[in-house]
Image (cartoon, rainbow, N blue to C red):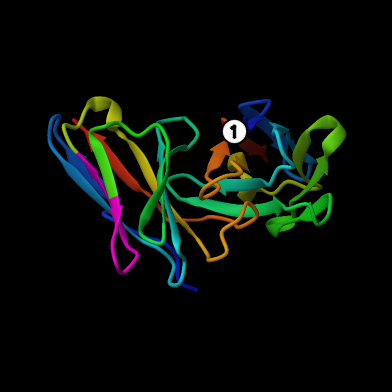
Amino acid sequence: AQSVTQLGSHVSVSEGALVLLRCNYSSSVPPYLFWYVQYPNQGLQLLLKYTSAATLVKGINGFEAEFKKSETSFHLTKPSAHMSDAAEYFCAVTVPSGTYKYIFGTGTRLKVLA
Amino acid sequence: AAGVIQSPRHLIKEKRETATLKCYPIPRHDTVYWYQQGPGQDPQFLISFYEKMQSDKGSIPDRFSAQQFSDYHSELNMSSLELGDSALYFCASSPPGTSGHNEQFFGPGTRLTVL
């Protein structure tokens, strides 16, 4: 069965510092993985997705993620945090049948300190 | 660009009442999903439709039902509301050629409060 685990429900970084949000997956087949961001009282916005084309995926707002099969990981990074990055981040994996619904991780709330 | 539209954005109901949430997918998207996000929780899949037919079903209570209409909009009907139904309900849609790598486009959500 597909699942994702996000380590760290809360992460705080200083403005300008590296952002690292962790996601590990479990999948019986090669996975399709996604990172979404959710700002307060808003919907989910896609940051980036892994579809097996390339292991290093670049997304919007300077975020990127690297798929590591050996580590079953898909961690999200950004070299320099900005105050506007403060939000909730969700990692998701698709279930490989039917309409490919998402299974989400429990989310990581990122706080950026001035 | 057109986005997923959900209405209403906010809804307040009493226990045991009914609620209807509406979702208008992005034009030409053929798959619609419903998710429920409780306070401080991750979104949980409820149900999905492909070409107006129910496709997948998640942990959706029997008190809830949903359908997709000929114009592709979808409605989530919730009866005998309970306090625990208070949540943010998201609708998402995805384009034709559904496969695992198709991203889902999310609406802004409907915040349901049950008093």
Residue ID for mark 1: A105
List x then y, in percent, for residue B83. 24, 26
- Is B69 positioned to the left or the right of B79 in the image? right
- Residue at 28% over, 47% down: B66
User: Could you tell me which quadrant the C terminus of chain B lies in?
Assistant: top left
- Residue at 37% over, 41% down: B88
List x then y, in percent, for residue B86. 29, 33
- Residue at 81% over, 47% down: A79
Q: Quadrant of the rendered structure where residue A29 is?
A: top right
Q: Quadrant of the rendered structure where residue A33 is?
A: top right
The total of numbered circles placed on residues is 1
Query: In which chain is the residue bearing label 1?
Result: A
Say which element carries label 1. Answer: loop
List x then y, in percent, for residue A106. 56, 30
Residue B77 inside the magenta-drawn segment: yes
Magenta-colored span: B67-78
The amino acid pointed to by label 1 is: Gly
Where is B81 relative to B111, above or below? above
Camera-nearest residue between B94 and B87: B94
Camera-nearest residue between B43 and B94: B94
- Is B6 positioned to the left or the right of A77 in the image? left
- Is A24 positioned to the left or the right of B100 in the image? right
For the residue carrying disc 1, how many other residues have a C-alpha within 10 Å: few (<14), some (14-19), or many (20+)?
A: many
